[in-house]
Image (tube, rainbow, N blue to C red):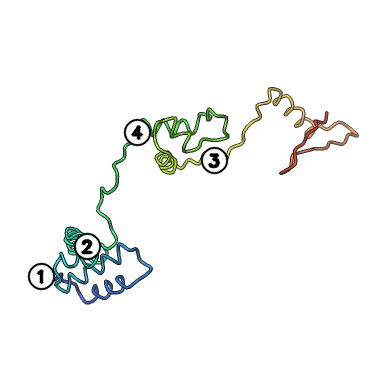
Amino acid sequence: MSLAAVALEVSEGDRGVLERLARSGSVSARSSRQARVLLLASDGVANEEIARRCGVAPNTVRAWRRGFDVGGVGWLGTAVGGRGPARSLDAGRVSAIVADTLFEEPPDGSACWSTRLMGERHGVGKDIVARVWREHGLRPWRQDVYKLSRDPDFEAELVDVVGLYLDPPEAAAVFAFDEKTQVQALDQFA
């Protein structure tokens, strides 16, 4: 038989908020469960019995009571800091991933790095690479820069084309042919 705990002191206003949260389907399951636990605690139900009814550990009930005592209803839905796995990536490896993303080309000839390919390169998981990219605002699959052609004659051809527009020959018509989406220019016109 469980001993009854000291009833949690809850104001009428806070009790109304807790009752709404306990019944709500639009709040997180964590907030709803915390509200049910705190309502039972305010009725003086023993911590072990609350834990059994709500499907949590007795220590969780005690922790949530303490959290409510300190933070009131604004505390609901919060998690204790330090939860989850510890970060296992040092600053040097993070900077190496960022530098490779910005300045190196993938070895397989891809247009951009994938999280898996970058992860293999640095010996980390794809989720870690995705997190580093997100934290640094990197999106290698998006190209927002103008890239020059790798054609060795590009500069000479550029000068010729710009020259036609700036100083066209007399009585000559200048036509510009450009590739369109899904249409490739197969012939070169001289």
In this picture, residue 149 sits left or right of residue 167: left
Question: Can you tell which mark lies on residue 91?
Answer: 4
Q: In the rendered view, tell whether residue 65 sits above or below residue 87.
A: below
> Could you tell me which secondary element the residue under label 2 belongs to?
helix
Q: Please tell me whether mark 1 or mark 3 is closer to you in this view.
A: 1
Q: Which circle's residue, 2 or 4, is located before the other in the chain?
A: 2
Q: Residue at x 14, y 72 (%)?
A: 44
| Residue 123 x %, y % | 39, 31
Kind of residue at disc 4: Ala
Q: CA distance from mark 4 to mark 3?
A: 24 Å
Q: Which circle's residue, 1 or 3, is located before the other in the chain?
A: 1
Circle 1 is placed at which residue position? 4
Q: Residues within 10 Å of mark 1 (few under 14, many from 20)?
A: some
Q: Residues within 10 Å of mark 2 (few under 14, many from 20)?
A: few
Quarter of image, res 182: top right
Q: In the rendered view, tell whether residue 150 sits above or below residue 178.
A: above
Quarter of image, res 32: bottom left
Q: Which circle's residue, 1 or 4, is located before the other in the chain?
A: 1
In this picture, residue 74 sits left or right of residue 103: left
Circle 3 is placed at which residue position? 141
Question: Can you tell which mark lies on residue 71?
Answer: 2
| Residue 168 x %, y % | 83, 33
| Residue 176 x %, y % | 79, 37
Q: CA distance from mark 1 to mark 4?
A: 51 Å
